[in-house]
Amino acid sequence: MPCVLDLGFGQKVQRHRFAELAAAAGLPARLHFLDVPAEERWRRVRARNENRGDTCQLGFDVTREMFDFVESIWEPPSEAELESRE
């Protein structure tokens, strides 16, 4: 059954490792990337901090400092990663 995993693989090495694990299990994996501006992502994080619903599993607020740190280590996928299909 197809499914979407939104696991936030922010670095190429993490994405590559997951693709290897999926392939070893005989499962196809495809990378989808939504290029949303940082300020929009921060707006959404703030909204999630303020309006946690039943489906939000995060037990703490994400601060601007946390957000900025993750932004500093983010590696957008290359064209080769996006074109790679299994």
Image (cartoon, rainbow, N blue to C red):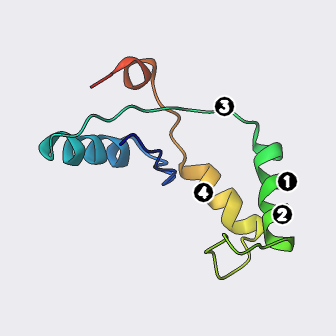
Q: What's the CA distance linking mark 2 and mark 1?
A: 5 Å
Label 1 vs 4, first from the N-terminus: 1
Are the residues tagged 3 and 1 within 8 Å (C-beta)? no
User: At 85% across and 62% down in the image, what residue appears?
Assistant: 47
Q: Amino acid at mark 1?
A: Arg
Residue pointed to by mark 4:
70
Q: Amino acid at mark 2?
A: Arg
**Label 1 neighbour load within 10 Å: few <14, some 14-19, many 20+:** few
Closest to the observer, 64 or 31: 31
Are the residues tagged 1 and 4 within 8 Å (C-beta)? no
- Determine which quarter of the picture holds residue 45: bottom right
Q: Amino acid at mark 3?
A: Asp
Residue pointed to by mark 2:
46
Q: What's the CA distance linking mark 4 and mark 3?
A: 15 Å
**Label 4 neighbour load within 10 Å: few <14, some 14-19, many 20+:** few
Q: What's the CA distance linking mark 3 and mark 2?
A: 19 Å
Residue pointed to by mark 1:
43
Residue pointed to by mark 3:
35
Q: Secondary structure at mark 2?
A: helix
Position in image of residue 75 (x %, y %): 50, 40
User: At 53% across and 51% down in the image, what residue appears?
Assistant: 73
8 left or right, relative to 24: right
- Determine which quarter of the picture holds residue 86: top left
Q: Amino acid at mark 4?
A: Val
Closest to the observer, 49 or 64: 49
